[in-house]
Image (tube, rainbow, N blue to C red):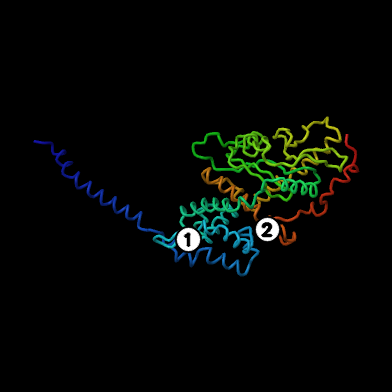
Amino acid sequence: MEDSTAQTERYFAPQFMCIYDVLESENDRDRRRFWVRPIFSAEMRFLQGASDNLISEMELVDNEKYVNYFRMTPKLFNQLLSLCEAGLTKQTVVRDPIPAKTRLQVVLLYLASGDSMTSISYAFRIRHNTVTKIIAEGCNEIWRCLKDSAFLTVNTNNWKSLANSFQEKWNFPNCIGAIDGKNVVLQAPVNSGSTFYNYKGTHSLVLLACSDAHYRFTLVDIGAEGRRSDGGIFRTSNIGQRFEEGSLQLPLPRSIGGNDGPILPFVLLGDEAFALTKYMMRPYPRSSALNRTKKIFNYRLSRGGRVIQSAFGIMAAKWRIYRRPIIASVPTAIKIVQATCCLHNYIISHEAVLPATQRFYSTVTTEERSAGCYALLDIDNTGSVS
């Protein structure tokens, strides 16, 4: 005779498994009871979403707040939309896709506000995972549409134009740009170890950029690990290698003081992190033994070189995604940086024709108004320097 306990287990086990399967299938149905949550439906998006309500209202009655919301005027937004609309438009399969206009609004608000993707999801009544895809695809599309027109076209005439602007605005001759790197702080990437860990104690990737005299980026290298130095990144980057090869069509050296003045090459302005080369000018090493001439040279170089720092500052102030660690994968973070660099140049270039008082994105500083390019002309009368 079999043990009664064994008979009981054999008798109840099949019934128990059946009950468990029923409960599990009911739980699965509960988890999948929504194809789309009601608050994210197309109807609620139209009735309560920011795109068809708040944004439309600001566009009609309050352009100032619209600019604060998207960092550009409605006219400039529509121009950008016309460039990106084809790449942002999706085909209709089962449901009507989210319009390209709404997709671009999601991307711009994310970059301009620095809010989380979850907050953007609730504001626009779009699912979180859809918002994530929209931001990645939208940033990539902005980069694809603007990169050819927003950045410098490399040729001799354009380099000369940049140098003339630096001479006029910052009183530094034969300067074709200021170069520096910016650490873009990230949430620590998965399994990255110390690869992106920088000297500031954060995880970051590096935006290495050159700026013209008007705070626009001319050349950019994006994606280097935060642990690397600016000089090392430049040396191994495509930009640095092309400068080294001489393939960027730099103008021939020219005189800086009339026919009798010294003939000097065209150079970038960098800080101590960069090596001194025939195309890179850096300050004299910091020392109490510097004479007056060297101190004046360092001052003039730093005055021209700070343009790139100002460009980074303008971009970070306007696109507040840089005010906190970017919570995204490294490829998506690179797309975000690419998009903001393009938008930074795009807006400044379109506002350049406006008076300073009508510019929403960047304005002339008080120092520039009062001093202009003549701030250093009376440097000999500023006091004795040992």
Measured in 3D between alpha carbons, the distance from the residue under mark 2 to the one under mark 1, in whole angstroms, is: 28 Å
Label 2 environment density (alpha carbons within 10 Å; few <14, some 14–19, many ≥20)? few
Place of residue 109 in the rendered image (x, y in percent of width and height, measured from the top left) = 57, 56
- Horizontal side, residue 273 vs residue 289: left or right: left
Residue shown at the point (87%, 42%) measured from the top left: 259
Secondary structure type for disc 2? helix
Picture residue at 46% right of the left edge, 54% below the top: 130
In the rendered view, tell whether residue 229 sits above or below residue 18: above
94 in relation to 328, above or below: below
The residue lying toward the viewer, choosing from 323 and 363, is: 363
Q: If you read the primary sequence from the N terminus, does the residue marked by circle 2 or circle 1 appear first?
A: 1
Q: Which residue is mark 1?
A: 98
Task: Tell me the kind of residue under disc 2.
Answer: His
Answer above or below: position of 220 versus 130.
Answer: above
Q: Secondary structure at mark 1?
A: loop
Which residue is the site of mark 2? 350
Q: Position of residue 260 (x, y in %)?
A: 88, 40
Point 32% across, 55% down: residue? 29
* Residue visible at 19% across and 48% down in the picture: 15
Q: Nearer the viewer, mark 2 or mark 1?
A: 2
* Observer able to see residue 321: yes
Q: Nearer the viewer, residue 243 or 332?
A: 243
**Image check: 177 left or right of 72?**
right
Left or right position of 365 against 86: right
Dot label at residue 310: none
The answer to whether residue 39 is seen in the rendering is no
Amino acid found under the numbered disc labelled 1: Ile
Q: Quadrant of residue 236?
A: top right
Residue 70 x/y as whole percent: 61, 59
Q: Residues within 10 Å of mark 1 (few under 14, many from 20)?
A: some
Placement of the N terminus among the 4 image quadrants: top left
